[in-house]
Amino acid sequence: MQPDTQPLFEVRTPLGFTIRTTPAYWSRVLVKHPDLRNRLEDVKRTLSQPDEIRRSSRDPNVLLFYRSGKQHWLVAVGRRTNGDGFLVTAYQTNAVKEGERIWPK
């Protein structure tokens, strides 16, 4: 495997599949969301132990993993195709977005 394709992390979700990302892609997320610079472990925890998971209202292959924090929700967005999952982005928000709540039911 090329160094830029080595996983930074692979996290098993409660839905039974793994979401991963590379160091290069995580760096791209941090450019857009620098407030997550020291929050990698929190993002991993959001994927593995979310408070809830919602399916995107725009794309059924995109799932939003939410975990509540002190002041905001932390959201880790993943896409699942052919059983494989990868991180799309992560960010903080004040409110849970629309979309079908799929976990917990």
Image (tube, rainbow, N blue to C red):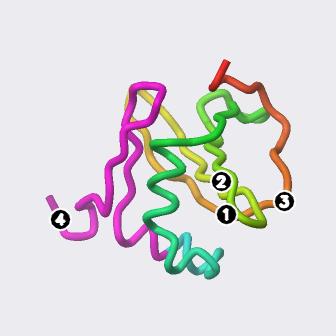
Considering the numbered disc 2 on the image, is that residue within a helix, a strand or a loop? Answer: strand
- Do callouts 1 and 2 mark residues in contact (Cβ within 8 Å)? yes
Under mark 3, the amino acid is Asn
Q: Position of residue 7 (x, y in %)?
A: 28, 58
Of residue 82 and residue 26, the one placed in the foreground of this image is 26
Query: In this figure, which residue is indicated by the disc labeled 2?
Result: 75
| Among the two numbered marks 1 and 2 on one chain, the one whose residue lies closer to the N terminus | 2
Which mark, by number, is residue 94?
Answer: 3
31 relative to 48, above or below: below
Q: Is residue 4 magenta?
A: yes
Left or right, 95 with reference to 30: right
Q: In what element is the residue under mark 3? A: loop
Q: CA distance from mark 1 to mark 2?
A: 5 Å
Q: Position of residue 78 (x, y in %)?
A: 54, 44
Q: Name the residue carrying label 1.
A: 91
- Which residues make up the magenta segment? 1-27
- Check disc 4 and report the residue beneath it: 2
Is the residue 21 above or below the residue 27 in the image? Answer: above
Classify 10 Å Cα crowding around label 1: few (below 14), some (14-19), many (20 and above).
some
The image quadrant that residue 29 belongs to is bottom right
62 to the left or right of 8: right
Which badge, 1 or 4, comes first in the chain's sequence? 4
Q: Is residue 24 or residue 94 the one in the foreground?
A: 94
Query: Which type of secondary structure does the marked residue at label 4 adopt?
Result: loop
C-alpha separation, residue under disc 2 versus residue under disc 4: 29 Å
